Image: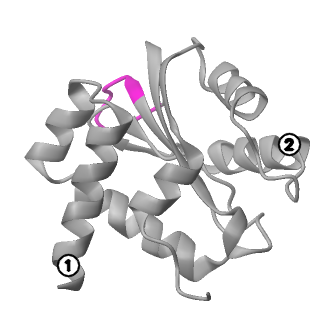
Amino acid sequence: MNKPMDLGELLERGGVYYEFPGNTVQGVLDALVESIPIPPAIQAQDLLLAVKEREALMSTSIGEGIALPHPRNPLATKIEDEFVALVFLKNQVDWKAMDAIPVDTLFFIVSSSAKSHLKTLSSISFFCKEEAFLKLLASRASKDNLIKYIKDTEQKWEG
């Protein structure tokens, strides 16, 4: 099982969270690591430090109110510990975005290798250019609807 996981699978594992608290980047990151189930093989404090260090290098906002917080280097040691959590913030947060749009949607990414990390970033980037997907995010669609859309789209790529 060395094949990087699809975004749909990673989201099923990581979950979708609504009305997530926090008014600052640091506050949101603290709440993320405290609230989201993290695989036992990953130390929460190591993850928090790695994500904050990465954010300090440069904002992980990709524009349009979306940010992709993640560690700079893979923290998961096994593919089974990878996940992506989709987080809809209760309040917009100034994430120092290049387009100056406050962030209200996060894809929190934890990968086990550079290859899977790049595949995940590429998939998210692709989806965030699709009008239909952006509408799902804007409407705060249900976890089931979001994952169905992603998996259906990923199947078309493979087909």
Choose mark 2 or mark 1, whichever is in front. 1
Furthest residue in direction bottom, as rendered: 2
Quick one: label 2, few (<14), some, or many (20+) residues within 10 Å?
some
Q: Which residue is tagged 2?
A: 44
Amino acid carrying label 1: it is Trp
Secondary structure of the magenta portion, mostly? Answer: loop
Residue 79 visible, this orientation: yes
81 vs 98: above or below: below
Residue 68 appears at what percent x and percent y? 49, 47
Residue 3 appears at what percent x and percent y? 53, 86
What SS does tag 1 mark?
A: helix
Span highlighted in magenta in the image: 96-104
Residue 120 appears at what percent x and percent y? 45, 66
Residue 148 appears at what percent x and percent y? 27, 51
**Who's the residue at 44% across and 74% down the image?**
119
**Who's the residue at 20% across and 35% down the image?**
136
Q: CA distance from mark 2 to mark 1?
A: 34 Å
Q: Earlier in the sequence, mark 2 or mark 1?
A: 2
Depth check: 30 or 158 in front? 158
**Who's the residue at 22% across and 27% down the image?**
138
* Image quarter in which the C terminus is found: bottom left
Depth check: 155 or 87 in front? 155
Please tell me in which quadrant of the rendered image residue 79 appears.
bottom right
67 vs 154: above or below: above
Q: Which residue is tagged 1?
A: 157
Quick one: label 1, few (<14), some, or many (20+) residues within 10 Å?
few
Q: Is residue 65 left or right of residue 5?
A: left
**Who's the residue at 60% across and 14% down the image?**
22
Furthest residue in direction left, as rendered: 131
